[in-house]
Image: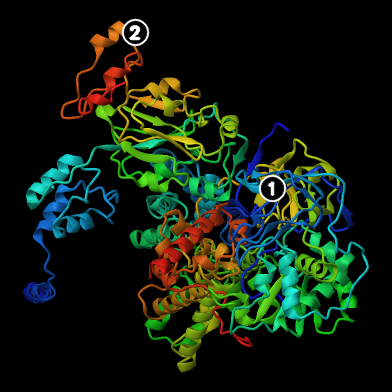
Amino acid sequence: MLKTFPIGGVHPSENKLSREARIEYFPLPDTVVLPLSQHIGAPAVPVVAKGDKVVVGQLIAKAGGFVSSNIHSSVSGTVVSVDLAMTASGLRQPAITIRREGDEWAEGIDCSSELVRECTLEPAEIIRRIADAGIVGMGGATFPTQVKLTPPPGKKADVVIINGVECEPYLTADHRVMLERGEEVLVGTSILARALGVQQCYIGIENNKPDAIAHMKELAESFPGIEIVPLRVRYPQGGEKQLIAAITGRQVPSGALPIDVGAVVQNVGTALAVYEAVQKNKPLVERVVTVTGKPLAQPANYLVRLGTPISALIDHAGGMSDDVGKVIGGGPMMGRAMSHPEAPVLKGTSGVLLMRQKESHRKQPDTCIKCAKCVSVCPMGLEPYLLSKLSKKRMYAEAEPERIVDCIECGSCSYTCPAGLPLLDYIRLGKAETLKMIRARAAKS
Amino acid sequence: MDNKLIVSPSPHVHSGNSTRRLMGDVLIALLPAFVVSVWVFGLNALWVTALAVASCVVFEYLIQKFLLKGACSIGNLSAVVTGVLLAFNLPSTIPLWLVVLGSFVAIAIGKMTFGGLGKNPFNPALVGRVFLLIAYPVQMTTFPLVGVDATSGATPLAFVKEALKSGSSVSDILPSISHQNLAYGLTSGSLGEVAAIALLIGFVYLLVRKVITWHIPVAVLGTMALFTAILWGIDPESYMSPLFHLLAGGAMLGAIFMATDYVTSPMTTKGMLIYGFGIGVITVLIRVWGAYPEGMSFAILIMNAVVPLINKYVKPRRFGAKKVRGAAA
Amino acid sequence: MGVFAYTILTLSLLGVLLAAILYFVASKFRVWEDPRIDDVEKMLPGANCGGCGYAGCRAMAEALVREDDISTLYCPVGGGECMKQIADFLGKAAPEREPMVAVVRCGGSCEKRPRTNTFDGARSCAVSASLYGGETGCSYGCLGFGDCVNVCEFGAIRINPETGLAEVDEEKCTACGACVKACPKGVIELRKKGPKGRRVYVSCVNKDKGAVARKSCEAACIACTKCVKACPFEAITIENNVSYIDFTKCRLCRKCVAECPTGAIVDVNFPPRKPVEAAASATPSATPGKVENPTSVAEAPAQTAPEVKPETKK
């Protein structure tokens, strides 16, 4: 019996259309738009101005606080503007726009594909390089990596878990990275372990990627301390808390962080970025993005420069058609639907998913028949029907003791609801409002 | 591109579950029992069931349209399920006007007065049945003669109760009870409750289709078995065996199809076990010491009333509630 | 017969016993409350809308009785009359406030603000607003899912199916402010009801730069500053690319309305504009007890200067 997380979960159709597509280097874009907020935390502060010449890998915006991240130019060219730019959600946010002229890299960046295995740097130096490179959680959470590698005083990690689960349907970026750049991922993993002073690393991979499991197992033989853990296919296994529970059996308590149970979780893509930053001195300027969906002619995995318009990726993979009803940034369970696909690829863009018209519409909501399916699939052991009802009625004070803030927004409840109720829509809202309420209370006392 | 993009919060895919599909699965699961009842009771069973279903659907349609003025709700098949379950709880020889009356009580009073599907606190089919049982006891307990060891039209439970009351001991009556016939449905009783095996086939189907979980039926039947086994162990001459209690009367039908009604059962697995335990205990209490030979309907209705309380206080196993082990911090 | 007498006797005894217990408990656990709270609560409208800032009419009544100075307490639903009645009853000074009304500051109707995408989530403004910019190019305006409608206790607000915008019924609106709190976009504002319900306001909250705002909505304020220049009373300011009329300073001259190039400034409840000569005679009489009468004629703005401040005219 394969390992998996203890409570709830669903199994949506996997639809990994692009699993066989090798990672392609995406043609360089003419212009890139790099928003200053591509991570969780304070926005970065621009250090270039309109008209400046920049090269690839040059710092263009500095971290704006402890929980923040550097941003580097992903092309060489001229800064066209430092102003508001449209994002995929239709909101304008501060961004740096650069027009590309050639492809000149900053000095000191090693662009060769040669593997550099040895790393003898001190942990502090590793963490500094990671912070300098502007690395964030590449699975979509976009939490600055250096913060995760700096546990609060008194807490110590004893295990590093690399998330190669990719439990979202359709997405294959991590899968391809493990197959094609597995060694670099493993080096990145050992660097992360070194930075944290941890001996034991696990790479969790769901059983629907047997090729990746076999490949990584073979490679990992020469990396002592790294163990490949095959996992039963179940969504949301890629959730941080679920993955820790699946692999180590430790459950992160309500309101606590993974570090409280001694675990640090990083995505496969992050491990790769860490490798490049530490061993090759290469900042985060490109990432692997899955472009997929049933309406697309050639679902693909691209290595894309950050800031490339998402519409360019779609065009390259077969283009928009009248049948496209929805464009999603990320996977179908947790991704965000876009109103403006001209928006750029960000650090956290793991995939672009196109849905057909007829797949795009939600079911007409019916009445709740109290079938309890939402309760049984909730991976956090919550009662979605109740939380949704309380949120809809704005009864946040009542929702708090029902642990609404524990919700990881995985969408299993809405996915399974036979009445087609938008359970998560309201829970997400209620969670945000409840957090606001809690923060206000903390500020008062 | 002319068509506008659709934007919605995640998730963007759905399992394809629907109320209609779940209800459809329940109907399919009821099919074996229905076939047996037609085989045992003849075409009467067919007429009673058809009439109950038709009248439930018509009442729901009329009330929804003219009183609640809401969107038509009969498409979700819940009224059909109510109709079939009500019919399964009636004797095949019941006057047809009583079927219509029972359907009316089930749908109008049991369900629509509370606002329709999802809001009724009590199982509508049982509301209809219990109303008929109390208001028309004679018609509701006159059963046709069935099988070779005809027990004079009384159900096995009623027969046993009478016999034990009149001073006979279990060993006296045992020869006139055939457990095989109870399992195959060759016995006297309501339409759908007679064939234990057919009902169990339906149970397996529901489990496979993930319409229900095992918790409620197993809790109900397990509790009944345990409780009657204790009594039987104490005095096998005064109390019937657990096997008899599980096979006779509405135990199977109630545990598998009536107690598991989504709307009127608890939301958490722990709650379901408590609820099932309650039903089991009350059923046996009524069967053994109560005035009625069968207590399943009453037990379910009583426990229905407790469900909101169970939902309020019995919470699911939360993630992270387990004690942290092996933590460095 | 014996059974009968027995029954009556038992029941009577039981009744007496229970009455005694009830009496004991009631007197033992009695909590003294100012009886005036009940009276005040009865005088309040009883809508429990929370517009006063208290959890309900009872809480408001308690506060009214408790506080010596009730000038900060005001029931917007009952209005001045109700407050006066309560103040008289309590022997305190009546708080006075001008009648207010909720105003929806968005003019982006379906044809003026074309839809660029379709929202298919829960029909809730808050859900939509927390997800993304909205169905149109404007990420500031009314979303039209009616969170305000759902919170209104008085049925005073509705979504007009033709414009897709929230509309306030001023007859029913009590200015309780529930919709203001419910609107995630901050589109609704409580503004002075104005004499005869006449108001002038900027019906736009779009903070985008003029060109961007105009592109997404024909009725958007483009922050051209024409209204600021036109205003003789310095009531108009522009902040974050959007104009705002301070209703405490506005004298309802409507010069700005005529100046606004996009029609973002709206006047309501004014009689239709008339030729100059008709205007002089048709000037409506002053509203009793209130500041002045607003003339409705753009050609004669000077007359709209209020009598309290005649020197500010022109």
- Between A110 and A254, the one lying in front of the other is A110
- Chain for mark 1? A
User: Residue sitting at 48 percent across and 36 percent down?
Assistant: C242
On-image quarter of the C terminus of chain A: bottom left
Q: Quadrant of the N terminus of chain A?
A: bottom right
Q: Is residue B102 left or right of residue A137?
A: left
Q: Which residue is mark 1?
A: A49
Q: CA distance from mark 1 to mark 2?
A: 56 Å
Does residue B279 appear to the left or right of A17 in the view shown? Answer: left
The quadrant holding residue A145 is bottom right
SS category of the residue bearing label 2: loop
Front in this rendered view, residue A275 or B146: A275
Vertical placement of residue C198 versus A365, above or below:
above
Q: Do marks 1 and 2 share a subunit? A: no
At a point 22% along the width and 48% down the height, the residue shown is C74
- Characterize the local packing of mark 1: few (<14), some (14-19) or many (20 or more) Cα atoms within 10 angstroms: some
Q: Residue at x 19, y 22 (%)?
A: C286
Amino acid type of the residue that numbered disc 2 sits on in the rendered structure: Pro
Q: Is residue A401 visible?
A: yes
Relative to the observer, which residue lies in front, A332 or A93?
A93
Going by the numbered disc 1, the residue's amino acid type is Ala
Residue C306 in view: no
Q: Which mark is residue C183?
A: none
Q: Chain of mark 2?
A: C
Q: Position of residue C58 (x, y in %)?
A: 21, 56
Can you give x and y, in whole percent of width and height, for residue A143 in the image?
A: 65, 65
Question: Which residue is farthest bottom?
Answer: B234
Q: Which mark is residue C275?
A: 2
User: B229 or C293, which is in the foreground?
Assistant: C293
Q: Nearer the viewer, mark 1 or mark 2?
A: 1
